[in-house]
Image (spheres, rainbow, N blue to C red):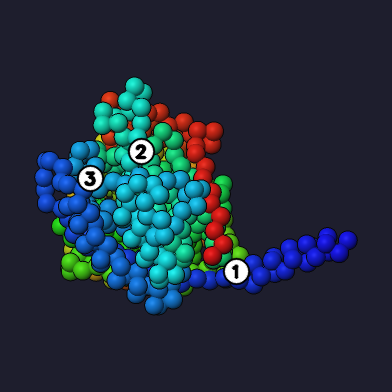
């Protein structure tokens, strides 16, 4: 009886300590990195040359990691491709790769760097986490040997994966994620199945994925909806595409639409329009950075709710079609026309007056707008647009989009082309759509590529409306919907020796689930 009582007391005490040590908020850091790129070559460099370049980049990341730790950050996210860039073939990337084991092996590379072969990059990243007592999120390349007799095994006998790694405050490897949705990454292979990677800390439950993954259900949506993560870690090498897909615009909208924290770290390369990092909360961006003027990296900090669902500011669930389907369409405009955003054909109607109510439809999908401008500039033209269908040249992802955007000029043929500046302000706007999906991401982008924190909100009936009177000059106001069940369910290997196209079956039975528990 005494032993039993003692065991019970110890268990209760442990639970109390764990509860007390749990943090309601934590300080997060993301670092936008101006990567030092390798020389363009068609032949592989030596492993020593590859390591030399990676160490030059890690030297820069080390300064950011130390700064984050000094500022009291619990975790820092660094970008995709931050160690070596992106212009490779299967052969030229190989010297940069290491064997990254499953975190269940309980490994601190800093203390045992030779346990899984030659792993100098993993050892250094682990030591940076350990020596600074901070979680470090990094992106690197993983190589896994395979049987050359297998049909999927590449000719060099290795699978090559675009991989995120996470090290805890003790330097232990606690998460590994292989990117599933590759974007023109011929140097890497597509994993056989999407991985759902999570890990627990005293400051919340985390999920992780990479760049292009954010546009798909798995792993991105499933981590939030089914695994209830509090925060997503998001290394990316994102090229900005106006008017709907700049990094800060879409990533902040995704965090709001999914009602989850998102820590996004982007590469900084102005020649390729790569910039835009941020720490985004479910209700509003905490901090963000977009810089096309300088060549410098940038570190960002913000205090974030560890468990945003428990916060008083956590936004309510939205029925995205409730309002739009409850009203009759506004009178049809006489000047409707077709135009393109990238390769997607939208139906547009011009905002001909300084105030009004408009509806534009494509197929059965309709977008409604009520608005009042505050002194429209005579040379500026705005349109309301609607699109429903498979997106882009790939014709794989099904979009439903309502957007108000500024045209490039008074020539309506310029509507949908990239525009970076505006003068027109809106005193009021209310945008809604008859969405068939529950996954809608609200975007507001201001002149000179700026966000509008706390200046707009989404009502529970699906209306995107402004707050606090007149806006700053507007580039776009959009509701970006993704209808995943209407996607063309195929995914092309970024690479494979046989260039096979693999089917992506949307069921949890076909998904690898990885969860690691970390209490430090």
Specify which label sits upstream in the sequence, 1 or 3: 1
Q: Residue at (35%, 69%) from the top-left corner? A: 65
Q: Which of 106 and 182 is in front in this view?
A: 106
Q: Nearer the viewer, residue 395 or 79?
A: 79
- Give the structural element (helix, strand or loop) at label 2: strand
Q: Position of residue 410 (x, y in %)?
A: 18, 56
What is the quadrant of residue 166 in the picture? Answer: bottom left
Q: Residue at (25%, 48%) from the top-left corner? A: 96
Residue 95, label in figure: 3
Question: How much space separates mark 3 and mark 2, taking CA atoms?
Answer: 13 Å
Q: Residues within 10 Å of mark 1 (few under 14, many from 20)?
A: some
The residue labelled by disc 2 is 144
As drawn, 192 above or below 5: above
Specify which label sits upstream in the sequence, 2 or 1: 1
Q: Nearer the viewer, mark 1 or mark 3?
A: 3
Specify which label sits upstream in the sequence, 3 or 2: 3
């Amino acid at each position: 009886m005494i032993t039993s009582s003692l065991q019970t007391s110890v268990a209760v005490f442990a639970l109390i300590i764990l509860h007390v040590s749990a943090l309601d908020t934590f300080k997060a850091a993301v670092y936008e990195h101006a990567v030092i790129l390798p020389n363009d070559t068609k032949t592989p460099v030596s492993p020593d040359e590859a390591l030399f370049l990676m160490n030059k980049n890690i030297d820069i990341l080390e300064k950011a990691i130390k700064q984050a730790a000094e500022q009291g950050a619990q975790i820092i996210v660094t970008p995709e491709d931050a160690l070596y860039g992106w212009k490779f073939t299967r052969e030229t990337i190989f010297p940069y790769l290491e064997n990254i084991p499953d975190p269940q092996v309980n490994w601190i590379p800093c203390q045992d760097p030779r346990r899984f072969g030659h792993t100098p990059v993993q050892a250094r990243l682990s030591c940076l986490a350990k020596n600074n007592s901070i979680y470090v999120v990094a992106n690197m390349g993983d190589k896994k040997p395979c049987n050359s007799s297998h049909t999927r095994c590449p000719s060099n006998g290795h699978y090559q994966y675009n991989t995120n790694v996470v090290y805890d405050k003790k330097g232990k490897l606690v998460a590994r994620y292989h990117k599933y949705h590759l974007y023109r990454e011929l140097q890497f292979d597509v994993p056989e199945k999407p991985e759902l990677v999570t890990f627990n800390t005293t400051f919340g439950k985390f999920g992780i994925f990479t760049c292009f993954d954010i546009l798909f259900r798995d792993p991105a949506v499933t981590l939030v909806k089914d695994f209830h993560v509090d925060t997503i870690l998001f290394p990316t090498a994102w090229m900005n595409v106006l008017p709907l897909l700049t990094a800060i615009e879409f990533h902040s909208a995704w965090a709001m639409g999914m009602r989850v924290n998102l820590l996004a770290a982007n590469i900084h390369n102005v020649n390729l329009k790569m910039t835009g990092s941020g720490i985004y909360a479910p209700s509003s961006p905490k901090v963000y950075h977009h810089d096309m003027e300088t060549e410098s990296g940038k570190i960002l900090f913000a205090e974030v709710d560890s468990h945003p669902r428990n916060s008083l500011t956590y936004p309510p669930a939205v029925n995205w079609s409730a309002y739009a389907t409850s009203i009759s369409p506004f009178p049809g405009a006489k000047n409707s026309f077709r135009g393109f955003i990238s390769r997607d054909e939208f139906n547009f109607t011009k905002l001909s007056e300084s105030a009004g109510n408009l509806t534009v439809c494509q197929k059965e999908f309709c977008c409604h707008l009520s608005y009042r401008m505050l002194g429209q500039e005579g040379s500026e033209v705005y349109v309301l647009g609607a699109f429903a269908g498979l997106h882009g040249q790939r014709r794989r992802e099904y979009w439903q989009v309502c957007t108000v955007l500024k045209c490039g000029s008074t020539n309506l043929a310029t509507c949908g082309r990239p525009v970076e500046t505006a003068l027109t302000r809106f005193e009021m706007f209310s945008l809604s759509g008859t969405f068939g999906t529950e996954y809608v991401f609200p975007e507001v982008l201001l002149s000179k590529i700026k966000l509008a924190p706390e200046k707009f909100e989404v009502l529970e009936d699906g209306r995107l409306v402004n707050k606090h009177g007149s806006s700053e000059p507007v580039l776009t106001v959009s509701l970006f919907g993704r209808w995943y069940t209407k996607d063309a369910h195929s995914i092309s290997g970024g690479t494979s020796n046989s260039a096979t196209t693999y089917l992506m079956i949307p069921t949890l039975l076909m998904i690898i689930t990885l969860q690691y528990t970390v209490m430090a």
